[in-house]
């Protein structure tokens, strides 16, 4: 049995997956517009404009890649949670 199949059998595991997918969708809702129209997203967010917009697009692309990898691999999610805990 894999880790994900064990997680699916537990109620907490099902809720974890639901919250994880909500977070992935929230990340994508921010990252995709920032990737396609970075100056409009910065203006809408009341943030100062970035001098080269490529940095805003790069950050959005990293967020998309992180969201995709988080949806595919539980180990990545656990590493991200550990990193966030170590950062704070």
Image: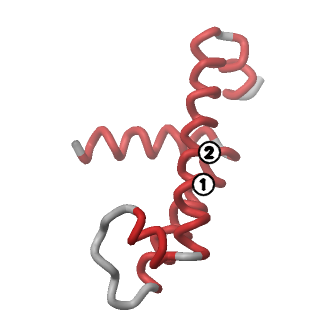
In the image shown, does 66 or 75 lie closer to the viewer?
Answer: 66
Q: Secondary structure at mark 2?
A: helix
Label 1 neighbour load within 10 Å: few <14, some 14-19, many 20+: many
- Total marks placed: 2
Which residue is located at x 56 percent, y 70 percent?
A: 61
The percent position of residue 12, horizontal first and vertical second, equals 57, 13
The CA span between labels 2 and 1 is 5 Å
Determine whether, in the image, residue 81 is placed left or right of residue 37: left
Residue 24 is situated, as x and y percent measured from the top left of the image, at 59, 45
Q: Nearer the viewer, residue 6 or 18?
A: 18
- Left or right, residue 73 beside residue 2: left
The one nearer the camera, 44 or 18, is 44
- Residue 29, position as x, y percentages in the image: 59, 53
Residue 37 image-quadrant placement: bottom right
Q: Secondary structure at mark 1?
A: helix
Instruction: State if disc 1 and disc 2 touch (CB < 8 Å).
Output: yes
- 4 w.r.t. 28: above or below: above
- Taking 68 as reference, is 39 above or below it? below
User: Where is residue 38 shown, x and y percent of the image?
Assistant: 49, 76
Q: Please give left or right for residue 29 compared with residue 39 in the image.
A: right
Placement of 42 over or under 8, stated as above or below: below
Q: Is residue 88 above or below residue 35?
A: above
Label 2: which residue? 25
Residue 53's label in the rendered image is: none
Q: Tell me, what colour scheme is on the image?
A: secondary structure
- Residue located at (53% from left, 41% from top): 77
Residue 28, labelled with which disc? 1
Which image quarter: residue 6? top right
Whether residue 8 sits left or right of residue 82 in the image: it is right
Image quarter (top left, top right, bottom left or bottom right) of the C terminus: top left
């Amino acid at each position: 049995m894999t880790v994900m199949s064990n997680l699916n059998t537990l109620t907490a595991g099902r809720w974890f997956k639901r919250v994880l997918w909500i977070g992935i969708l929230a990340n994508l809702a921010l990252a995709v517009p920032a990737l396609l129209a970075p100056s409009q997203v910065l203006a809408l967010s009341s943030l100062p404009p970035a001098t080269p917009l490529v940095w805003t697009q790069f950050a959005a692309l990293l967020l998309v890649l992180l969201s995709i990898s988080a949806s595919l691999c539980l180990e990545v999610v656990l590493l991200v949670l550990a990193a966030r805990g170590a950062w704070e």
